[in-house]
Image: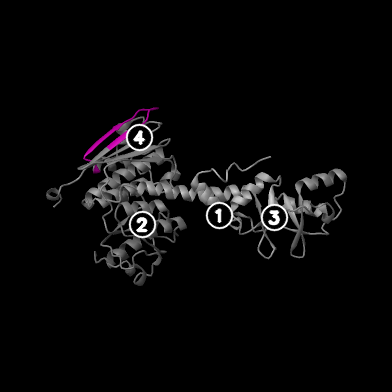
């Protein structure tokens, strides 16, 4: 018997808050396929097959009076009673949830009773949905994702409130993750902007960070952008987990690319990434070989007021 | 030039206009994002067919103000969301990049 491995007393606070805040109605499936009391088990079975469901509530008017589950169908097949009306074999011992209950109650119900689904009633005792443990898991995962996003954002925001962050920020970059591409560079740009640096310097750093980030997305097996913010310069280091560059000199040539057609169709892979980084950097180093991690470092010095003027 | 010029004078459809008083001083036409990144002037309008959110990231990092999506390309919802957040305006048009470029150049009094 599966249970939902979330303890409603001792789980992390974030999870506890979620399972009390989220209501059954937020996670339930509100498209419910029902049958009447005189529907035959054969028809109920057909409904299950067509809709890919494993339990059908039996209604008398608007009131739920029972439920036919896959188990009931299997037993009916065994007995040869498939043409009998549902009302005769349905489970009448109904455990229902209310749509306004927090999902913590649903979780404890799933763990306490052996049922795989619960009908959900509104306050007028009308059937408004069904909830399975899968619905709970999915609903929780969606919320946990949002919550983690929020917490990550808090970590990123911490320390830059004074607009003068010094130290290292690290950003994990996943291979082929075009969805998140640019996030690290935008963060780096925002941190530099908060320091009121010359816009040209900020732009140079943004270009270097973005090209290195996109390179990790397109070419690497995944890696990291580390950005060290110092008094007079920013050091952007990109380190990946391979597969390495065969010919570094060739990779530094403008227009040379190993990107495939669909990456180029997105507007990337023009063979300008590394040359762009080098062009905007005050100091640029790259080391790589086949099968080894590639490390690229770009240092951008901040112009003093006199230089900038 | 006010960005609203694109809608009012050229009939381009505003899909996202975070700052209705926004202005631009130049334009840049390219579908290669690293070309845009490396060479596009600040406060400019990006004229392109790249209708995905990486174009917004590049425009934002390069300090650009607006994106004009040519040849009936339409932006995805996540592109619009990102643009709203980053303060980048997005317009759509049936014009191709060449036509959009000369019309915008005229609006900017560059020709």
Magenta span of residues: A280-297
Q: In the rendered structure, which disc, 4 or 1, sits on the residue that comes first in sequence?
A: 1
Question: Marks 2 and 4, how far apart in space?
Answer: 27 Å
Which numbered disc covers residue A189?
none
- Which chain contains the residue that carries disc 2? B
Side (left or right) of A161 relative to A101:
left
Looking at the rendering, in which quadrant would you find the N terminus of chain A? top right
Residue B84: where, in percent of width, then height?
Answer: 39, 60
Which numbered disc covers residue A239?
4
- Which chain contains the residue that carries disc 1? A
Residue B25: where, in percent of width, then height?
Answer: 25, 62
Circles 2 and 4 on the same subunit = no
Q: How many marks?
A: 4
Side (left or right) of A31 relative to A60:
left
Residue A299: where, in percent of width, then height?
Answer: 24, 39
Circles 1 and 3 on the same subunit = yes
* CB-based contact (under 8 Å), mark 4 and mark 1: no
Circles 2 and 3 on the same subunit = no
**Is label 1 in a helix, a strand or a loop?**
loop
- Which chain contains the residue that carries disc 4? A
Magenta run includes residue A158: no
Q: Give the residue pinned by disc 3.
A: A96
Q: Give the residue pinned by disc 2.
A: B86
Q: Give the residue pinned by disc 1.
A: A22
**Is label 3 in a helix, a strand or a loop?**
loop
Q: Is residue B96 visible?
A: yes
Question: Marks 4 and 1, how far apart in space?
Answer: 40 Å
């Amino acid at each position: 018997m599966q249970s939902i491995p979330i303890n409603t007393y001792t789980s992390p606070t974030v999870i506890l808050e979620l399972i009390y805040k989220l209501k059954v109605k937020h996670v339930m499936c509100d498209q419910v396929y029902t049958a009447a009391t005189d529907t035959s088990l054969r028809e109920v079975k057909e409904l299950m097959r067509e809709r890919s469901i494993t339990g059908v509530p039996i209604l008398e008017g608007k009131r739920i009076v029972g439920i036919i589950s896959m188990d009931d169908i299997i037993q009916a097949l065994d007995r040869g009673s498939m043409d009998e009306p549902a009302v005769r074999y349905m489970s009448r011992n109904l455990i229902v949830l209310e749509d306004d209950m927090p999902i913590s109650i649903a979780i404890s119900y799933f763990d306490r009773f052996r049922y795989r689904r619960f009908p959900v009633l509104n306050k007028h005792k009308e059937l408004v949905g069904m909830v399975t443990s899968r619905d709970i898991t999915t609903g929780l995962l969606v919320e946990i994702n949002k919550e983690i996003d929020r917490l990550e954002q808090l970590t990123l925001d911490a320390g830059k409130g004074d607009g003068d962050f010094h130290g290292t920020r690290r950003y994990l970059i996943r291979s082929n993750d075009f969805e998140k591409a640019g996030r690290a560079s935008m963060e780096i740009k925002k941190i530099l902007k908060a320091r009121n640096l010359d816009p040209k310097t900020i732009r140079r750093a943004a270009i270097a960070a973005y090209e290195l980030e996109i390179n990790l997305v397109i070419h690497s097996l995944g890696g990291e952008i580390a950005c060290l913010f110092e008094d007079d310069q920013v050091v952007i280091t990109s380190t990946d987990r391979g597969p390495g560059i065969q010919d570094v000199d060739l990779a530094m040539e403008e227009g040379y690319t190993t990107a495939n057609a669909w990456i180029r169709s997105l507007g990337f892979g023009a063979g300008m990434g590394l040359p762009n980084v080098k062009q905007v950097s005050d100091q640029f180093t790259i080391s790589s070989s086949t099968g080894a991690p590639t490390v690229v470092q770009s240092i951008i010095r901040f112009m003093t007021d006199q230089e900038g003027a | 030039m006010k960005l609203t010029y694109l809608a009012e004078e050229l009939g381009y459809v505003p899909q996202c206009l975070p700052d209705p008083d926004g202005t631009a001083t130049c334009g840049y036409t390219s579908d290669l994002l690293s070309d845009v990144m490396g060479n596009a002037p600040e406060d400019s309008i990006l004229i392109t067919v790249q209708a995905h959110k990486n174009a917004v990231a590049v425009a934002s990092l390069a300090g650009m103000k607006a994106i004009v999506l040519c040849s009936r390309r339409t932006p995805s919802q996540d592109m619009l969301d990102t643009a709203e957040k980053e303060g980048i305006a997005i317009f759509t048009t049936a014009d191709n990049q060449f036509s959009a470029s000369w019309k915008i150049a005229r609006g900017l009094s560059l020709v």
